[in-house]
Image (tube, grey):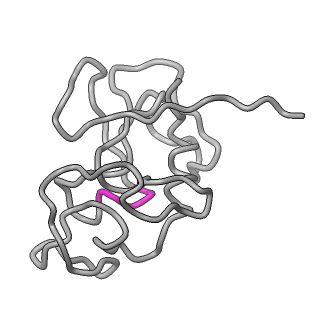
Amino acid sequence: MLPAKAAKACALAMGKDIANPAEMNFDGSEAHKKAYSVAGAYRGKTTPVKSFSRNGLGLYDMSGNVWEWCEDWYGDYPGSSNAGCSGPASGTYRVLRGGSWFDDAESSRASSRVDIRPEFSYYNYGLRLACGVSPG
């Protein structure tokens, strides 16, 4: 199964406050520097899994590298917070999160998401499989 967007956002948020190309794969060139990023390498391609340190949840490559499909349909968040939201029950567009090697630091932020039709594919889209854990 694909992770829900809330789970992906939580895992992304366990990352760093400053996007650093030494710690994630995005376009870190000087031309794309933001107040919350460090200028550095632009690799221009994906990197192998575990090329960077894991985050606070022990997960690798949560920001950058490839946009990751989420299970959820794209839609407005109910209320003012996206915490714990599972999104609409149906829709036309799915959620992608995490940014990619092709994008700047803004796309790699935990708050960043895009809406894409599920039949669409692109060279910087990928997925992360997740498995459910039974309480107990």
Viewer-nearest residue: 27 or 9: 27
Q: Main secondary structure of the magenta part?
A: loop
Q: Which residues are magenta?
A: 107-111
Q: In this rendering, would 135 be left or right of 52?
A: right
Magenta stretch: includes residue 109: yes
Q: Say above or below: 122 vs 57.
A: above
Q: In this rendering, would 2 be left or right of 105?
A: right
Magenta stretch: includes residue 68: no
In the image, farthest residue toward the right: 136
Q: Residue at left 32%, top 55%? A: 64
Q: Residue at left 60%, top 40%? A: 85
Q: Quadrant of the C terminus?
A: top right
Where's residue 116, x and y in %? 27, 31
Viewer-nearest residue: 91 or 102: 102
Q: Say above or below: 41 vs 55.
A: below
Where's residue 40, x and y in %? 20, 78
Q: Residue at left 51%, top 45%? A: 8
Where's residue 131, x and y in %? 62, 29
Q: Say above or below: 37 vs 136.
A: below
Viewer-nearest residue: 9 or 20: 20
Where's residue 135, x and y in %? 84, 33
